[in-house]
Image (cartoon, grey):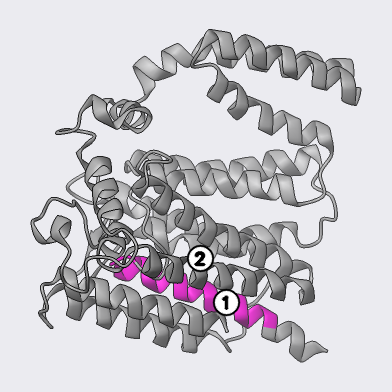
């Protein structure tokens, strides 16, 4: 079921890429089709291969080695590695061994204790740091996102959860001193209500205050100019409609101009006149929505909804290792889906994350099909045991 839905999404993406290619069967469209067929081949290849559910260090070291490759290539920094025949993005491929390594680490742990959470944090933080150095903010946050997902989903003590959840919440509210004061008041009331131990309560309040004071420094000294611009434009695209706000504005124009039925196949004006940037990657949904409108967009959303529903339904029949891996894969898809569409619609800042099974890009397409293959592989191995 999931594979059929994914193929439908690939067909719609191929139509969009064909339209972007102005009806030509060469170049961009040809590469996209080749990427899809190669990704399907990878899916079929790995769906029945027996993969050891041990050797945590092996999988994790593969992740780190892949992420270290761009740091030793020239010119630096570099997100893509160009080979004689093909090129690939290490931060995408590294997701696969990373998503296998963490379930191996957690499979025999019923509860995530504080000591385990510290190990888990550093296991996620190192890949985050290596990808951030490239620099690739959108892909780097993925590894931290996986950490918070595990802390929230797995059985964990409330003190451990608060220890990791409070800092990012403090960071979000600290951009305005009034909202930050309200946050501290609400946090204090919550800590008193749930009866947190005094030492932990004191640490939580102290951490929040420290982050609130450090945020101005991070904003002015740590974040790069383009990152600050993206956040400002995200909050108000009209600040720079011909500069940093151009992408968001043109994407929203393309989506809105599609209306109910769309302008028709190969009749999109935004991408046709080159107003829409990255029409085949970051803004491929805007390209699709312009030509197929609300109806076509609803069909695409229905495909993704059924895809996620199918994966969640399978979770009921998994063992410990498969359950952790499956949840992480679902959140991986959900992460890319939310960040891509949210960025195109102006809901969240642009990150350059591709839309799963839809955006142009061989590395992303192969990685997503490989994760789906391993997802089904581990489910099948469990069924065979029964």
Residue 171 versus residue 339: which sits nearer the camera? 339
Residue 376, relative to residue 281: is it above or below?
below
Horizontally, is 207 left or right of 6 in the view?
Answer: right
Mark 1 and mark 2 residues within 8 Å of each other at the beta carbon: yes
Horizontally, is 372 left or right of 69 in the view?
Answer: right
Q: Residue furthest front?
A: 260
The residue lying at 8 percent from left, 56 percent from top is: 273
Label placed on residue 96? 2
Horizontally, is 106 left or right of 265 in the view?
Answer: right
Real-space Cα distance between discs 1 and 2?
9 Å
What is the number of callouts on the image? 2
Q: Is residue 374 magenta?
A: yes
Residue 63, relative to residue 198: is it above or below?
below
Q: Position of residue 12 (x, y in %)?
A: 34, 76
The secondary structure that most of the magenta stretch takes on is helix
Q: Earlier in the sequence, mark 1 or mark 2?
A: 2
Span of residues in magenta = 359-379
The residue lying at 26 percent from left, 82 percent from top is: 34
Query: Which secondary structure, mark 1?
Result: helix
Q: Residues within 10 Å of mark 1 (few under 14, many from 20)?
A: many
Q: Residues within 10 Å of mark 2 (few under 14, many from 20)?
A: many
Label placed on residue 374? 1
Q: Please tell me in which quadrant of the rendered image residue 7 appears.
A: bottom left
- Please indicate, yes or no, whether residue 305 appears anywhere in the rendered image: yes
Query: Which secondary structure, mark 2?
Result: helix
């Amino acid at each position: 079921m999931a594979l059929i839905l994914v193929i439908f999404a690939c067909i719609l993406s191929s139509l969009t890429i064909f339209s972007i290619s102005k009806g030509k069967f060469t170049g961009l469209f040809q590469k996209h089709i080749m990427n899809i067929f190669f990704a399907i081949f990878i899916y079929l290849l790995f769906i029945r291969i027996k993969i050891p559910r041990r050797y945590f260090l092996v999988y994790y070291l593969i992740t780190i080695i892949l992420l270290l490759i761009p740091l030793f290539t020239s010119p630096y920094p570099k997100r893509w590695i160009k080979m004689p025949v093909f090129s690939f993005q290490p931060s995408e491929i590294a997701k696969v061994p990373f998503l296998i390594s963490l379930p191996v680490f957690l499979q025999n742990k019923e509860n995530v204790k504080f000591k385990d959470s510290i190990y888990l944090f550093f296991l996620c933080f190192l890949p985050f740091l290596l990808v951030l150095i490239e620099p690739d903010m959108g892909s780097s946050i993925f590894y931290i996102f996986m950490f918070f997902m595990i802390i929230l989903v797995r059985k964990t003590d409330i003190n451990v959860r608060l220890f990791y959840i409070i800092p990012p919440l403090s960071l979000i509210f600290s951009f305005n001193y009034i909202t930050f004061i309200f946050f501290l008041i609400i946090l204090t009331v919550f800590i008193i209500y749930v009866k947190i131990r005094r030492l932990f309560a004191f640490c939580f309040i102290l951490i929040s205050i420290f982050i609130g004071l450090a945020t101005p420094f991070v904003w002015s000294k740590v974040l790069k100019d383009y990152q600050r611009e993206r956040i400002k434009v995200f909050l108000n695209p009209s600040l720079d409609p011909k500069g940093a706000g151009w992408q968001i504005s043109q994407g929203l124009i393309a989506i809105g101009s599609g209306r109910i039925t769309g302008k028709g196949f190969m009749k999109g004006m935004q991408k046709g006149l080159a107003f829409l940037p990255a029409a085949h990657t970051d803004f491929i949904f805007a390209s699709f929505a312009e030509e197929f409108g609300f109806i076509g967009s609803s069909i695409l959303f229905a495909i993704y909804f059924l895809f996620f529903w199918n994966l969640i339904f399978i979770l009921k029949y998994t063992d410990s290792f498969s359950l952790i891996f499956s949840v992480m894969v679902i959140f991986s898809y959900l992460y890319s889906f939310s960040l891509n569409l949210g960025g195109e619609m102006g809901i969240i800042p642009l990150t350059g994350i591709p839309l799963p099974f839809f955006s142009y890009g061989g590395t992303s397409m192969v990685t997503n099909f490989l994760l789906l293959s391993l997802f089904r592989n581990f489910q099948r191995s469990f069924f065979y045991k029964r």
